[in-house]
Image: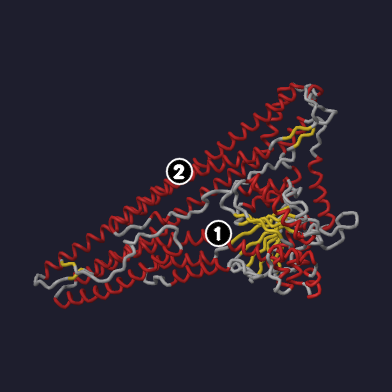
């Protein structure tokens, strides 16, 4: 039984297989084409996966990461009530060191932003809510800042905005930067302890490690709890979600699927490009394992299906604590953890082989093996599959173009000059043919450059239009929401409702704005894709008219950002406006404010509080449009450049033949030309055959669509064309 599987092993095999295929087709004779193949290998070497572990405080995220990644006690667990800073663990990245780390500290401007918040929103709140004191909203941040000043003393101002580098990272170093610190018996943070010394001013932590249990480069992110009270950290965490490929949502079996958990899962479920694994942790703390754990899982399954429908997720129950014991504790501790009747009954319930050694049984029951397998499957079917498909699409077009260009060149090599006795006629005819071909190729090269410049300008112009359209759509959605909320409040005012609290329905707003953002992006993306396809078709038409088709259809497959992750989250601290008795619903009468004026203030307040989230959505969509367009243009430009360079190379070859002809021609020269052409034709034929086989292998193993078999046929012989 495979109890400790390596994460991403099959993905590594697939990547190495494609790299081997690419390297077998390297083209040193054609530097620009060879450069495309070299870049494809580099791209695969840089292929990596980002996994974010998210969940509420005390769900055991840090312990889970320590065991999953084989880092033992690297991340602080027991010393802190929550992870205070997002911590990115980078495993085996070729472009990063395999040791050490960097800690980014908040700058003065970021502190100021936390302290001041949105000035306009706070001014509106003070005007709208008599007695409202904006300093209340600053209290947490001021306390956080004061604690940092107290701990750091004169170093405080010197440290702001700095980056701290370490050649080696230990758990003690991490405690200083990412832990919230030790708690005393009263639940207060011990300011004199070393743990958490810099966490008050730490924005993000980057830790670099050896590959460990990961077969491909992985970034594993430990995030603050989703109920973290600080908006700046919440914003950093939410922004990191956009780059995440796979989410591991850690739930405690004692508080599984609360309101915050369901809100998070619903947000993640609306984005088809990302995978989610739900790990129900701390099952070791349940009394009757064999009965209670399956019952909890059944309840969770029903709730997930009821509230999230047919969303694809993987639900796993386990214990990071058991995994930690199995990996790092002594035999006595392993026997103590795995020797109870409850544990044995649970193992029998989930099908763990009783013949396994206690350590292996503990690992199997911990759910860590199942989690690693789940991650491997999602890596292979998600980010790695996309990377392989993207590379294969580019390679298929490059190989196809090269194959067809070589076929055209092969036709030229197969032209045999016959000794018919009229040498001047042969000379004139061949020279004219070559000159005509040279001129045609030169004109083609210029047309390709001009077409690319014109289309690039048009795409940039349309990209701005699409981005503006998305912004307008989102703002229209926000306006409808604001009007609706204002109407509800106006009705409450008019009816004399005595309720003490009025809440904004931000969940409905979030879903609506995310849906609108996605729909607008899809519409804009389709429009941009049409322009790209038109450009590609024109390019293909110009090249194929003289040389060969480029296989544009495959070239434009697997572009990035098929969909996006809007992640709309209002950064409002005024979601709930408390209207206490001393103000009441008719507080405006006490301040001589008319009802209409009060409603107007509400509208402005809501809009201002939602604005930052709207801006983030718009920025996400705009960047995705730009990156998708840039990637498409880059692919076409690379193929076009390779075609242009091959054209230039062909022109140079033809010019050399003309020089030979001009220098004088006789029977011996004709024989030499024919011999050289025959030699080159043989080499070309072998190249074509190798490329044809490589294209077939590429289509069979890596492309989502099969290549045209007619394009991949091997060349079995030559046919002389008589001039």
Front residue of 145/384: it is 384
Give neighbour class at mark 2: few <14, some 14-19, many 20+ (Cα, 10 Å): some
Give coordinates of residue 482: x percent, y percent: 65, 31
Residue 580 position by quadrant: top right
Q: Which residue lies furthest to the bottom in this view?
A: 668
Residue 509 in sight here: yes
Q: Residue at x 80, y 67 (%)?
A: 340
Residue 203 in sight here: no
Q: Is residue 597 above or below residue 679?
A: above
Residue 61 position by quadrant: bottom right
Residue marked by disc 2: 527
Give neighbour class at mark 1: few <14, some 14-19, many 20+ (Cα, 10 Å): many
- Numbered marks: total: 2
Residue marked by disc 1: 383
Front residue of 107/585: it is 585
What secondary structure is marked by label 2? helix
| Colour pattern | secondary structure
Give coordinates of residue 198: x percent, y percent: 78, 59
């Amino acid at each position: 039984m495979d109890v400790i599987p390596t994460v991403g092993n099959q993905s590594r095999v697939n990547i190495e297989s494609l790299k081997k295929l690419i390297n077998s087709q390297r083209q040193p004779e054609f530097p620009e084409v060879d450069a495309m193949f070299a870049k494809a290998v580099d791209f695969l070497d840089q292929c990596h996966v980002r996994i974010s572990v998210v969940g509420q405080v005390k769900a055991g995220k840090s312990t889970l990461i320590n065991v999953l990644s084989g880092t033992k006690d690297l991340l602080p667990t027991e010393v802190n009530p929550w992870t205070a800073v997002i911590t990115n663990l980078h495993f085996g990245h070729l472009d990063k060191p395999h040791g050490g780390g960097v800690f980014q500290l908040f700058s003065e401007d970021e502190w100021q932003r936390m302290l001041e918040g949105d000035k306009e929103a706070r001014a509106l709140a003070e005007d709208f809510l008599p007695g409202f004191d904006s300093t209340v909203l600053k209290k947490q941040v001021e306390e956080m800042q004061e604690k940092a000043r107290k701990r750091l003393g004169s170093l405080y101002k010197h440290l702001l905005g700095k980056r701290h580098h370490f050649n080696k990272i230990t758990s003690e170093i991490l405690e200083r930067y990412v832990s919230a610190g030790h708690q005393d018996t009263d639940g207060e943070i011990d300011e004199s302890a070393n743990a958490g010394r810099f966490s008050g001013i730490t924005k993000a932590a980057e830790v670099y490690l050896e590959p460990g249990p990961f077969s491909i480069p992985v970034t594993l992110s430990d995030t603050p709890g989703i109920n973290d009270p600080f908006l700046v950290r919440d914003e950093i965490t939410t922004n990191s979600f956009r780059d995440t490929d796979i989410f591991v949502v850690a739930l405690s079996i004692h508080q599984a699927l609360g309101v915050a958990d369901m809100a998070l899962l619903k947000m993640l479920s609306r984005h088809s490009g990302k995978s989610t694994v739900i790990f129900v942790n701390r099952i070791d703390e349940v009394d009757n394992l064999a009965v209670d754990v399956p019952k909890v899982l059944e309840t969770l399954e029903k709730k997930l299906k009821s509230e999230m429908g047919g969303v694809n997720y993987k639900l796993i129950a386990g214990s990071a604590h058991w995994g930690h014991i199995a990996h790092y504790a002594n035999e006595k501790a392993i026997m103590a953890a795995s020797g109870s009747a409850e544990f044995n009954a649970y193992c029998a319930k989930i099908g763990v082989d009783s013949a396994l050694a206690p350590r292996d049984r503990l690992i199997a029951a911990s759910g860590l093996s199942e989690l690693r397998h789940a991650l491997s499957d999602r890596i292979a079917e998600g980010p790695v599959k996309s990377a392989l498909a993207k590379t294969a699409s580019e390679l298929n077009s490059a190989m196809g173009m090269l194959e067809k260009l070589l076929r055209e060149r092969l036709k030229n090599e197969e032209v045999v000059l016959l000794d018919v006795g009229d040498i001047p006629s042969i000379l004139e005819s061949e020279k004219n043919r070559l000159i005509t071909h040279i001129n045609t190729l030169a004109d083609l090269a210029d047309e390709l450059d001009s077409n690319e410049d014109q289309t690039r300008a048009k795409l940039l112009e349309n990209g701005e239009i699409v981005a503006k359209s998305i912004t307008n759509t989102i703002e229209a959605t926000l306006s409808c929401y604001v009007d609706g909320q204002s109407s509800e409040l106006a009705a409450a005012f008019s009816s004399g409702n005595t309720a003490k609290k009025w809440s904004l329905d931000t969940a409905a707003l979030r879903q609506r704005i995310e849906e609108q953002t996605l729909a607008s992006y899809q519409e804009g993306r389709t429009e941009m894709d049409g322009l790209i396809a038109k450009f590609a078709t024109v390019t293909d038409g110009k090249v194929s008219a003289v040389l060969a088709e480029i296989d544009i259809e495959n070239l434009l497959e697997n572009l990035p950002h098929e969909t996006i992750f809007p992640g709309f989250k209002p950064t409002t601290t005024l979601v709930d406006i408390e209207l206490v008795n001393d103000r009441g619903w008719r507080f405006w009468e006490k301040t001589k404010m008319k009802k209409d004026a009060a409603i107007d203030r509400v509208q402005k307040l809501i809009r201002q509080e939602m604005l930052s989230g709207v801006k983030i959505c718009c920025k996400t969509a705009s960047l995705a449009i730009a990156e998708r367009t840039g990637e498409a243009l880059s692919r076409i430009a690379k193929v076009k450049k390779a075609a242009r360079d091959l054209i230039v190379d062909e022109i140079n070859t033809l010019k050399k033949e003309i020089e030979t002809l001009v220098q004088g021609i006789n029977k011996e020269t004709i024989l030499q030309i024919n011999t050289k052409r025959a030699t080159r034709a043989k080499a070309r034929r072998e190249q074509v055959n190798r490329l044809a086989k490589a294209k077939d292998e590429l289509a069979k193993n890596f492309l989502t669509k099969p290549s045209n078999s007619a394009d991949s046929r091997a060349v079995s012989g030559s046919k002389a064309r008589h001039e």
